Amino acid sequence: MGQIVHFGLGNFARAHILDYTTDAGGSWQVIGVNLRSSATRDGLAAQDYTYTLDVQGTGVKPITIIKTILLASEGQQPILEAMANADIISATVTEKGYHLDQNSQLDLQDPVIAAELTGPPLRSLIGFIAHNLARRDRPVTILSCDNRVGNGDTLRQAVQKFAQAAQLSIDWSLARFPNAMVDRITPATTDRIRQKCKDPMAVPTEAFREWVIEDYFAGQRPDWPDVQFVQDVRPHELRKLRMLNGAHSFLAYTGLAQGYDYVHEAILDPQLRSQALSLMMEAGATLPLEIQDQVPAYAQALLLRFDNTELAHRLDQIAMDGSQKLPYRILETLRARAAPVLISAVRAWMSYCITKTAQGGKLNDPLAEDIAKAASSTQPERMLLKLIGAEDLAQLILE
Ligand code: CS2
């Protein structure tokens, strides 16, 4: 029997890796680990760890492969034991769950990481992996399923830095960290979906799904259907992060400013639609040559996915954690190509921060406090750019 220990069992993981693993069949089981909230664990525990995946157009699908869900707040030992037996340790902890600085290096000053380095309890994905690897004697694949460029490499470097700081000795030949691109638009669950599925823990998702993973595993893996295994995932992840996620963030900040609530509303606005398409095409022009010919068709397919009225994908869900998302979704693209629409995406984020702060609202972002300070300073835009490591772009954006 194969075992996956998955960190961060939110809606996305339940619509993506768990769906693929269900389709793979065989005897794979998933143990979930949640680092902060107990809500998903409590809700799923009450129904024997099963839930309904509501796949648009295909209908409801029962997911029954979760064995249990462990909470970091209830003790690290059971989690480390589960990890010791895992073939795959996967993660969807979102961008902020990696505790990185502006250079994508583990931030040793981050309060969660700094506390873990002084001793138990473990609280982060990075800390758990480092301690697991320090006591491992069998191979493991560590599979990041978060939206980041080079997510596997980034995670390995973060774990290495943690291990060094904690003076843990690790046999690195036992662990592999393939990079992966993951895609499936998965909004937060609404009451309508809960009622429709007669399941308080139901997860709604679109029919489309995509997963491209580097063929670099340490041991067995599920027989995941229609996963593309490649040597180098970079072209695929740049395509998805810059075109899909970049356009998403653009639509979130500009759409909210114009009073829209949902992606499907914002993308119907003729001006936003044409700007989103132009952002995708500009981003497409920064991609490696070998995939440039896919850009127009991919952009059209994205517009159709954004048009999806049934999905009810909220713009404020996408607007969350902007400080973590903008760097790889927009700023890198902008460094490669100084297109006006990319500049307006950054400006839209800045005015979102400034307006929210002026209204006394609190941003949903790990840097919320710094953002509020920057936004109410005498040079709000400059300070905001500094916060997201974009000082080099200040002239371009602010001129
Ligand atoms: C979205 C993503 O919330 C967001 O920031 O851009 O979650 C997006 O829906 C997924 O990456 C699609 O695969």
Image (cartoon, rainbow, N blue to C red):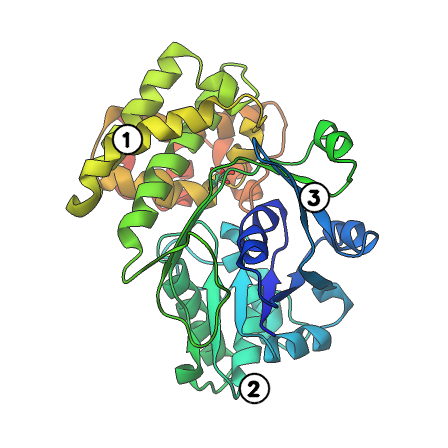
Residue found farthest to the right: 46
Check disc 2: other Cα within 10 Å, few if <14, some if 14-19, many if 20+.
some
Q: Residue at x 37, y 44 (%)?
A: 327
**Which residue, given by chain and number where applicable, does mark 2 sit on?**
135
Quarter of the picture containing the N terminus is bottom right
Q: How many marks?
A: 3
Q: Could you tell me which secondary element the residue under label 2 belongs to? A: loop
Q: Tell me whether circle 2 and circle 1 mark residues in contact (CB < 8 Å).
A: no
Q: Residue at x 75, y 72 (%)?
A: 75
User: Is residue 183 placed above or below 359 in the rendered structure?
Assistant: below
Q: Earlier in the sequence, mark 2 or mark 3?
A: 3
Residue 336 picture location, percent across and down = 21, 41
**Which residue, given by chain and number where applicable, does mark 3 sit on?**
52
Q: Could you tell me which secondary element the residue under label 1 belongs to? A: helix
The answer to whether the beta carbon of the residue marked 3 is less than 8 Å from any atom of ligand 1 is no
Residue 380 picture location, percent across and down = 43, 31
Which amino acid type is marked by label 2? Arg
2 or 3: mark nearer the eye: 3
Marks 2 and 3, Cα distance to the nearest angstrom? 36 Å
Marks 2 and 1, Cα distance to the nearest angstrom? 48 Å
**Which residue, given by chain and number where applicable, does mark 1 sit on?**
297
2 or 1: mark nearer the eye: 1
Which amino acid type is marked by label 3? Thr
The answer to whether the beta carbon of the residue marked 1 is less than 8 Å from any atom of ligand 1 is no
